Amino acid sequence: MNTQSKFGTSQPVLRKEDDRFLKGTGEYVEDATPKGALFGYMFRSSVAHGEISELDVDDAREMDGVHLILTAADLDEAGVKNAMGASIIDNRDGTKGAAPVRPILATTRVRFVGEPVAFIVADTMAQAKDAAEAILFDTDDLDVHMEVAPGGPALHDEAPDNVAYDWGIGDEEATNAAFEAAAKTVSLDIVDNRIIANSMESRGCYAEMKDDRLHFAYSGQGVWGTRDAIASTLGMEKEAVKVTTPDVGGGFGMKAFNYPEYFCVAQACRALGKPVRWQAERTESMLSDNSGRDLVTKAELAFDENNKITAYRAHATSNMGAYNSGFAQYIQSDLASRVLMGVYDVQTAYYRNTGIYTNTTQVDAYRGAGRPEAIFTLERVIDFAARELGVDPLELRRKNFIPADSFPYKTVTGELYDVGDFHKVLARAEVEADLAGFPARRDAAETKGKKLGLGVCYYIESILGDPGETAKIEFTDAGRVNLYVGTQSNGQGHETVYAQFLNEYAGIPIELVDMVQGDSDRIAKGGGTGGSRSVTTQGTATRATALSAVEKFKPFVAEQLDVPEVAFEEGQFRAGGSNRVMTMIEAAELAHQEGRVDLLITEETTELPGRSFPNGCHIAEMEIDPETGVTQCVKYTVVDDFGNLMNPMLAEGQVHGGVVQGIGQAVSEHVVYDEDGQLLTATFMDYGMPRAGDMPMIAFYSEPVPSTANVLGMKGCGEAGTVGALAAVANGVQDALWDLGLRQVDMPFTPHRVWEMLNTATAAE
């Protein structure tokens, strides 16, 4: 049967993987854990900063059911390198950023509440927790540094004034000169609050020994980096380590990195020769998962007399937490700079980013990784400038857009935008959001005693990650097709979209495709998932592999049909001038029968020539109850340019999820520590996760301008919803409160914070 027209690309195909997820037959880490695996439990620091004066695990080792307790000394004795890896960026003066050792298990000092100190392995979790209670642990407390600013109590000798790095990009001298010559300038301090990813499935892993090799399985976003890190840290050959990922219940960047628990589980398994498992409890995740955002930026715009932006200047101060995480030094510096000027035609800018160590959990990538931070800052200050200058926010954006005839366009920070038509997208958004009807909706809100504000954000994103990817097709003797991919689904619907490519280009029925991912043995290499790269890189490779398989089969099919040659049309091979046809699956079955193993596996690697740049306009209407401070998003409209959509329904779903995460951060999510570094928001009783009832209907529209950076004209869409949502919501709240004289409004807009703002405004009258 030819299902190409129904299930090919650009069709809103239902997610095929949902059948097993909805029936509860998905296989996550806890489902895949070997029977009889021992339980791992991490003993963590209860203080934010202190010299370890006592760590005695002798009594705990004698507890019932305890098989092993690892401390820093045990790792050293076993030859395990007690240090986590991290990427280090260059400072403005050309030196390297600070690189203090982040131990797997604390050595002489602890630097944040939740820092791993000892790893316990027991028959049951209850026994492991009982053993933790028997550990004697004490510290000589040190002063705690919580302020995201240079200075304060020192965390690391390698980081004077607690500065992790001091990075910059652009022409500082020319930018300062442009501000001196400007007709008008506008400045705004912008807070981007800290959040916790809180994926539905917490981090977890297990390890087992098989055939003298270590098999490590975990809930992550790629296998090859983790394999290499485990092998290097444990002093093993790469070939002696296999890493797999089963189904993953959400990643959002937080699961893209290695964590101390992974190395402890691997070493415990190797030491005991028995399978060992570990799964984070929710509070444990909140204490130990990499957080996101957490920066303060002073942003400034310079204008000429016609409100054309002449220069942009920004200095962000970012919280690194107690140590460097995997890519933390690059997130709000280099990655943010990729979209520093957004969609605006400005060639004079300077961006400085300073990273600060504090006695808190590490901060790293969270959905968007630097791009949401940069766009939030830019779109907040341009909206603020429009109000200060007394001009319409949309018109100020239009005046400064990169013209549609200027592409390809090289930005001030060196990105090459290949295509774009921002005027067209904004015009569509204005219509779809019914901005003409907003004054009437605002008046109606006023009659109910509510304040209604209109927030706009025009974002652009730079799709990051490895531009290369490999795909392999294998026709099995069961009449099915294995598709091997180098990306890792965290719930995005990869199984469906990639199967659509095989259907489109090789006529293979979508229901016969089995995706193979997350296995360092079965897949030689891959870029994993991150930076919205999957559909562009893996999609391009899958298309190339499908086309290559078709070409390989043509001579064989012609021979089987006893014709000189065949064409491939409408999902099947066809003999010219006749109605004789053969499907790819039928051809593969014959190849099996004929012993043509050379036809049964096809593999291709492709590399994209450049990044894609999804962009779009988000418009939020924010309603505030002045009596209670309750702030709600009551109407939300998105018009996106994702290029050609491979599955419009899944793209819309990605946007919905991203927008909800953005609204969540803006309205309710906030990580709070006390002055002693204790986490006060360590459960869902205290941390304000967004609920479905808090969300509006999210209207999504596509206004594509196909990318030239890949043959299918695609642009990544996985993070775009979050990139646009933050500023749209914040600008909506700013608009609602503007006539009260409030000029500094910062996320999160919780009822108490908004109520305080309103009362501050009332007291000032």
Image (cartoon, rainbow, N blue to C red):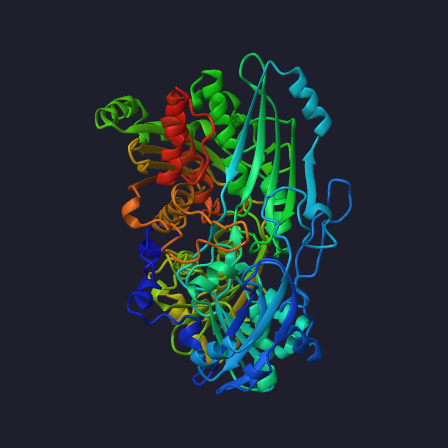
Q: Position of residue 640 (x, y in %)?
A: 41, 38
Q: Nearer the viewer, residue 709 or 265?
A: 265
Location of residue 246 (image quadrant):
bottom left
The reply to whether residue 589 is visible in this rendering is no
Name the spot of residue 303 as percent of width and height, x first.
Answer: 58, 18
Q: Nearest the camera: 282 or 646?
A: 282
Q: Is residue 518 above or below residue 757?
A: below
Point out the image quarter for the C terminus.
Answer: top left
Q: Residue furthest top?
A: 305
For the point 55% across and 53% down, which residue is it? 676
Seen as rendered, the residue at the extreme front is 140
The N terminus appears in which quarter of the rendering? bottom left
Q: Quadrant for residue 68, please give it.
A: bottom right
Residue 148: x and y, percent? 60, 43
Question: Looking at the image, is 624 positioned above or below residue 335?
Answer: above
Q: Is residue 503 left or right of residue 210?
A: left
Q: Position of residue 123 (x, y in %)?
A: 47, 84
Tell me the quarter of the picture where residue 414 sits: top right
Looking at the image, which residue is at 56% across and 58% down?
A: 469
| Count of numbered labels shown in the rendering | 0
On the picture, is 541 further left or further right than 437? right
Q: Is residue 333 visible?
A: yes
